[in-house]
Structures are given as structure tokens and as C-alpha cells.
Image (cartoon, rainbow, N blue to C red):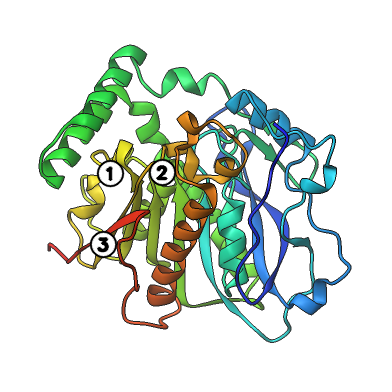
Amino acid sequence: MSKVRFPKPTGEYAVGTFTYTVKDDRKEVMHQGGMRSVTSRVYYPVLKESVKGLPKMVALSDNMLKGFKDAFKVAPNFKKKPEANRSECYENAEMIQGKKFPLIMFNHGYNSYREGNSFLCLDLASHGYVVISVDHSYESLCNEFDDGTVLFYDKTITKKMYEPMLGGVMTMYKLMKLRGTDAELAEKFDEAQRKYCKFMMGRLPEWVKDNEAALEFAKENFSDFIDFEKGVGASGHSMGGNTAYALCARNDNFVCGINLDGAYFGDYTNDIQTKPFMQISCKDNEYVVTRAYTRHTKPVYKVLFRDMHHIGFADCKHMIPMKSVVGKLDADLLHENVCKAHLEFFDAYLKGLKAKPDLKSNDVVTVSEYQPDM
């Protein structure tokens, strides 16, 4: 792969970044011994004039490129043009003194990585949000900790996702083609995951705890530039989007959330969504994410993309040229519409700048609104 072009943030601010690691008080259950460590990357707004002359952050480290290739069998090649491997942000850039911004917690998908949706996170930060992207040890393609420790994806997980594998994969494929009411399809998905996906169901509470640990640290250490008064927003891709839903349903700190094409693995028997929520999906997964449209007391939005595949909702849409993997939709159109959906939603329900998101169907997306059903 040679030609890689990263989109630029569109907001009024430049973006600073740094990472932090939390040593949680939970035992690490993915591997024997030790306690759970949670590393996160922070994206925050800075003044554009304050970053003039500063070097941009390296987008993909050598470790990340190795993990990327292990996951996708291809990876960007920056050897001929190393300057292309630069993210549109600046490490430890000077913060804007005396100004606070609302917080969005973001979660990557399974076998993705902390910076796997950086283009979206950067754009949100440039429009006046702090975004904390939470990493999940052993379940991302590469974890890089502040002490230099590096962990790669635990490949034994793949065999645990569906047990037995063949029956689980075939059943999930059939669910993608099944028709019925939203409630009926959600029930069918729950039946399937209880039979085949006990491991995945068990991981959701741990991802929620990763976020709670990262958020508690942020509250204790970053209150000088994060405004916590209006609550916290949540977003994520795939399993990370599922986590955003669970955070909104179960944690009072979170006031609204977005799920980027994530299936609802986990026990939601007793959960009712009491926060405004948005489900962004592609046609492939339209019928396995219907839980979002049931059992809710606040508006829920459905944003359905055409010509997209699941993996394409991450940064790799701009890095992997195979349309059979990431979808046929132009990468810039995908990015523009995903960012707009996020900004409209969070400007309404986190910043409180408007009564509701101003989103309409177009050639790229179909937008629907579900009023409270409880």
C-alpha cells in the first residue's frame, strides 16, 4: 500500500494529545497474574496559533503497523513517504488556559486499536470536545502503555467468540438476513448469543469497567480542562459502540451515546435506555442492531449508510483499498457524514446547543427517528 491520505479536522481548533495509564484494582482475567491496566489517548482542543512550528504526532508506530498487518494482512507503507505517517494532532500541545470542554468517551472495536477511529476523534476535538479513546488490553491489535510495555491481540480469543465456531457463524449470518419487528429481531439475536457467544457476553461488563476506571482518573486529574457539569457522551465502533450503549444504560455519568455498527453482545435483560441514543449502521448489520430501537424512554436515531461494510467505519477506510472489505462508499463521504452525525447529536444532547440533531436523509445515509416507546 502506498497512497494514504488522512482527512484534516474541520473545526476552529487544532488538536493536542497525550496518553495515560490507569492501574485498576481488578485482576486481569484475560491472562493469569497481574492487575488490569487501562491505557487511553486524550484528544483536546488547542488554539491553532499555539501549534505553529510543532511536529505532528506519528500516526502509526512500528508496533501498531505490525498489529495492523497481523489483523488485516495489509498495512500502510510509509517507507517512501514517512511524512505521510503523521496524525493531525500535536503531542502535549499547550492547553487553552481557563477554558473547559465537554467530554466524549470513545471505544474501539474488537481487534482494532486506541487510535483506530482517530479521524473521527480528531474532528470532534477540533469542534470543541475532549475525546478520551479507551484501549482494551489483549483485545486490541496493539496496546502501547506509558511505561513502554507492548501487548498484541490475543489470537486465542478468535476461537472463543463463537462456540462452536461453525454453528455460531452460520447462525449470525442467518440473523443478518432475517426479517421481523425490531423487538423480534432483538430477541432472536439474544437467543443466538446465549447459545454461541458466552465469551463475548462476558466481556461487555469488563469493557464498561475499563471506561469507568479511565473516567474516574480523568475526573481526578483533568477537571481543569474538561467540563463534567453536563455529563459525559459516549461513542464507539463495533464492540465499542455496544459499550457506549451499556454505559448510557447503566452509568449516570453518561447522558447520551452513539453506536457505530456494533452488535449488542451482552445480557441486556434488565436494561432500559434512558438517554438519547444514535445507531449508525450499514445494510449488512441493519437487522442485528435493533435492540437500540426498543425499550427506550428518550429519542433514538437510526443512521443507515449505503455501500458500506463493518470495518469501513474505522480509520482503515482510508488505508485499505479493498472495497470488498471496507465498502464502496467514498472514504471522504463516509468521514464527512459520520462526523456530521456525531457533531449534530452531541451538539444537541451534550453541549445543549439545539433541541435535537439536524439530520436529514441524503444520497449517503437514510435517517430515521424513533420516539420513546416506554
**Image height of 183 relative to 295, above or below:** above
Q: Is residue 266 visible?
A: no
Residue at 72% across, 28% down? 66
SS of the residue under disc 1: loop
Q: State the residue in front, 337 or 173.
A: 337
Residue at 73 percent across and 61 percent down: it is 89
Q: Residue furthest front?
A: 363
The residue drawn where x is 27% and y is 42% is 286
Residue at (86%, 65%) from the top-left corner? 54
Cα distance in 3D space between marks 1 and 3: 12 Å
Q: Secondary structure at mark 3?
A: strand
Q: Residue furthest right?
A: 53
Q: Earlier in the sequence, mark 1 or mark 3?
A: 1
- In x, y percent, where is residue 351? 45, 78
Q: Between label 3 and label 2, give the one nearer the viewer.
A: 3
> 10 Å neighbourhood of mark 1: few (<14), some, or many (≥20)?
many
Give residue 113's position: percent from left, percent from top.
60, 41
Q: Can residue 39 be seen in the rendering of this structure?
A: yes
> Which of the two labelled residues, at mark 3 and mark 2, occupies the earlier sequence position?
2
Coordinates of residue 137 in the picture (x, y in percent): 60, 37
Q: Which residue is mark 2?
A: 205
The residue that disc 3 covers is 300
Alpha carbon separation for disc pair 3 and 2: 23 Å
Q: Amino acid at mark 3?
A: Val
For discs 1 and 2, the disc positioned in front in the rendered view: 1
* In the rendered image, the vertical position of residue 29 relative to residue 275, given as above or below: above
Q: Looking at the rendered structure, which numbered label has been put on residue 179?
A: none
Q: Amino acid at mark 1?
A: Val
